[in-house]
Amino acid sequence: MSELTNLGVKAIRDGVADGSFTAREVAEAFNTAVAEAADLNAFIVTTPDHALAAADAADAKRARGEDLGIMGGVPIGMKDLFATKGVQTTAASHILEGFTPEYESTVSQKLWDAGAGMLGKLNLDQFAMGSSNETSYFGNVNSPWRKEGSNAAMSPGGSSGGSSSAVAARIAPAATGTDTGGSIRQPAAFTGICGIKPTYGRCSRWGVVAFASSLDQAGPMARSVEDCAIMLEAMAGFDPKDATSLQMDVPAWEAGLDADLKGKKIGIPKEYRMDGTDEEILKSWEQGKEWLRDAGATIVDVSLPHTKYALPAYYIVAPAEASSNLARYDGVRYGLRDLPDGAGLQDMYAATRAAGFGDEVKRRILIGTYVLSAGFYDAYYTQAQKIRTLVSQDFEKAFAQCDAILAPTTPTASFPLGSLNEDPLTMYLNDVFAVPASLAGLPAMSVPATVNSDGLPLGLQIVGKPFDEQGVLNAGLAIQQRAGFDAQPEKWW
Ligand code: GLN
């Protein structure tokens, strides 16, 4: 049965459809793999019955000769930021512990409607705030990867670190992620898998625990570009319940996959050559250019002059929105309530929030309320919004000269757990290459390129024009075909 867990989305879907194996066999194999991988701490709760029920439904449909759906018979992991009806949804925070939604998020419902089942709810940085998966109330996630010759526990990236760890460890063929400022792409790069953040508005935010609403976007994480295309097709689509949802049809991304880049121009932004970027990452970037040239593309130099202001602007805009979004956790409506003896309403709010939020979440709320306060609003928040506009304009100008942009996903490979969490600024720097596309709402993908001299994966990032997920996926496919990335973490869990 173990070989079934090596299969990705497309292979499982097609194998179930043509009768090579049953969906139940697949679900059982992954349920077993998940149960045996507790050391990764990738899941907050497991839902083996959900996966089995979806599998049985797929097998029954096949017996009746019905269409199984584009994710038919595929069990996936669900980041614990998506509300799932009847299944605890925590955002990895104590303040939501025990919260069981009465409703299903639009994205998860679409996946179930497409024939997928759920293996469980995946661990993440608390409220999706973090880059290492160390801010979860439920303990950090371990990456399945280790440095060669070392047993040090490594970060799977964040915030979608449960997702990246599970997919890289082959205990899930694919998982949902969310990306506010890199949380799909950075963990994908750290663990040698693919992940795409679509154009802002492609996937509904309804039922996704809000972090920074003008940036939050869901997307798939899987081990191939094809699998991401399939799963994104299932997740995307207009939703009247989300006011920022795009009123556009979902293109047939899987059918449109084409790695021939003849006639395409790929831009190389000179400002992404930053101090502190790892030499091996710069080398893989050079290699990426060669691969895309080989696929028929022309490489052109472009400039994104406001890149260095993007990260500071992000760390104003995102906390500002978070401080407002997280005001709803008051001890009245969801999860935890801390009501000291004889306390009044204000005391209850304060006690609940003090006990319920982790340190990083509190830091973000403090930053957010500070930059929005009357005396500092213009100096910080307004300035950051102006920078956001300039960053978007940089991309608009660059896309007059090219069809997509190639850059590293991260400035370094994965790092040992515990090595950066004393220093929030260094931690925030991890997102330096990811955040500009987030501020501009652009589709962006990370694809594994190679492993470094420590044996750790490195990713390359493709950023596309608005709504051009197809162009991003196609450039990703061209890289995938040439990189031939087949490294796997050695099993220690
Ligand atoms: N690491 C970034 C942060 O901490 C991005 C998080 C995300 O994209 N959810 O804000």
Image (tube, rainbow, N blue to C red):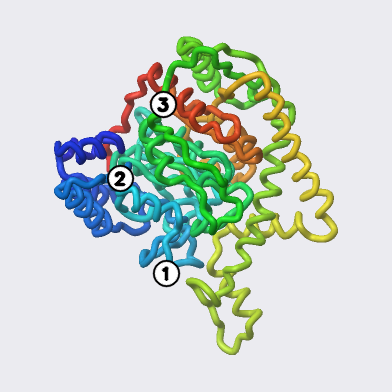
Q: How crowded is mark 1: few (under 14 residues within 10 Å), some or many (20 or more)?
A: few
Q: Mark 1 points at which residue?
A: 102
Q: Residues within 10 Å of mark 3 (few under 14, many from 20)?
A: many
Q: Residue 69 carries which label?
A: 2
Give coordinates of residue 290: x percent, y percent: 50, 11
Marks 2 and 1: which is nearer the front?
Answer: 2
Instruction: Please state the horizontal and vertical placement of residue 144, each as a whole percent of the image.
Output: 35, 39
Q: Badge 3 is on which residue?
A: 257
Task: Determine which quarter of the picture holds residue 259.
Answer: top left
First in sequence: mark 1 or mark 3? 1
- Image quarter (top left, top right, bottom left or bottom right) of the C terminus: top left
**Quadrant housing the N terminus:** top left
Q: Is residue 257 left or right of residue 130?
A: left
Tell me if I can see residue 216 in this picture: yes
Q: Is residue 12 above or below residue 94?
A: above
Q: Which amino acid does label 2 sit on?
A: Gly
Mark 3 and mark 2 lie on one chain; the one further toward the N terminus is: 2
Q: Position of residue 261 (x, y in %)?
A: 49, 16
Q: How far apart are marks 3 and 2 (CA)?
A: 19 Å
